[in-house]
Amino acid sequence: MIFDTHAHYDDEAFDIDRDSLLKSMHNQGIDYIVNVSASIDSIKKTLALAEEYPFIYAAVGVHPSETRQLSEKDIAWIKEKAQGDKVAAIGEIGLDYFWPEPDREIQKKWFAGQLQIAGEMKLPVIVHSREAAKDTLDLLKEQRKDLRKVVIHCYSYGKEMAAEFLNLDFYFGIGGVLTFKNARKLTEAVKYIPMNRILLETDCPYLAPEPCRGKRNQSSYIDFVAQKLSEIKQISKEDVLAQAMQNAKEFYGKERF
């Protein structure tokens, strides 16, 4: 009973065994996966995966690190693809200030442009925000009234910023980082965030949880994250997974599942 709300099975790390791995998901307790795009090319691959596998849904969008070459023509194409039956969200979009490029103004322009698509299409939004908390918050506040639902993917800020996002009724994507030994700030934030605002995710093939850290991540490893959450929240792992499943369906739309 696992819903992986954020995966990248189009990544080349899965080229060697993608089909056999995905066909084994049901036996590993995985009910649903949202495969999340990061570029124009990965949108095409993600849509193909969603078409081939009934339990996979697509999120279409361009990651901030890939926005340098975006154009209005690309935005129109993304909007067209967002109309597909298996498209569950716009994402992964946002801001990433960890690296100096692309220019911050370019990132903000295309973040706003893709948020507009989400508003027009009435689709939830998967937001990437790295070392860009204030600008992320400001842009989302500007367009909040037009947005359906928002999740801050791979949440990495503290309790204070979590309060700001909760005031906007946002969700929080929690994955393998929670199990890391140096995850004190995230642990404090997760204690504060109500369980009904947490989405479980892998970001696979990246960020595998302990004890699999350093390996290629995959959806079944969410079990380790659920165990850690159960310890923090002092509820059973089964309750964590059940609530996370309910949260994911509400976020992406119960009518899909």
Image: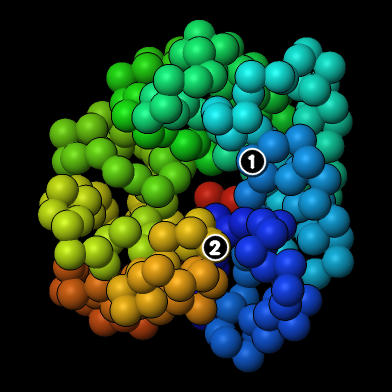
Dividing the picture into quarters, in which one does residue 238 lie? Answer: bottom left
Which three-letter amino acid code belongs to the residue tagged 2?
Pro
The CA span between labels 1 and 2 is 13 Å
Mark 2 neighbour class, 10 Å CA radius: few under 14, some 14 to 19, many 20 or more: some
Q: Which mark is residue 38?
A: 1
Relative to 61, is 176 on the left or the right? left
- For the residue pair 54 and 181, the one nearer the viewer reads as 181
Which three-letter amino acid code belongs to the residue tagged 1?
Ala
Dividing the picture into quarters, in which one does residue 226 lie? Answer: bottom left
Q: Position of residue 220 (x, y in %)?
A: 51, 78
Q: Is residue 72 above or below residue 211?
A: above
- For the residue pair 222 and 11, the one nearer the viewer reads as 11
- For the residue pair 236 and 41, the one nearer the viewer reads as 41
Q: Which mark is residue 181?
A: none
- For the residue pair 157 and 207, the one nearer the viewer reads as 207
Q: Which mark is residue 205?
A: 2
Q: Who's the residue at 71% across and 51% down the image? A: 58
Classify mark 2: helix, strand or loop: loop
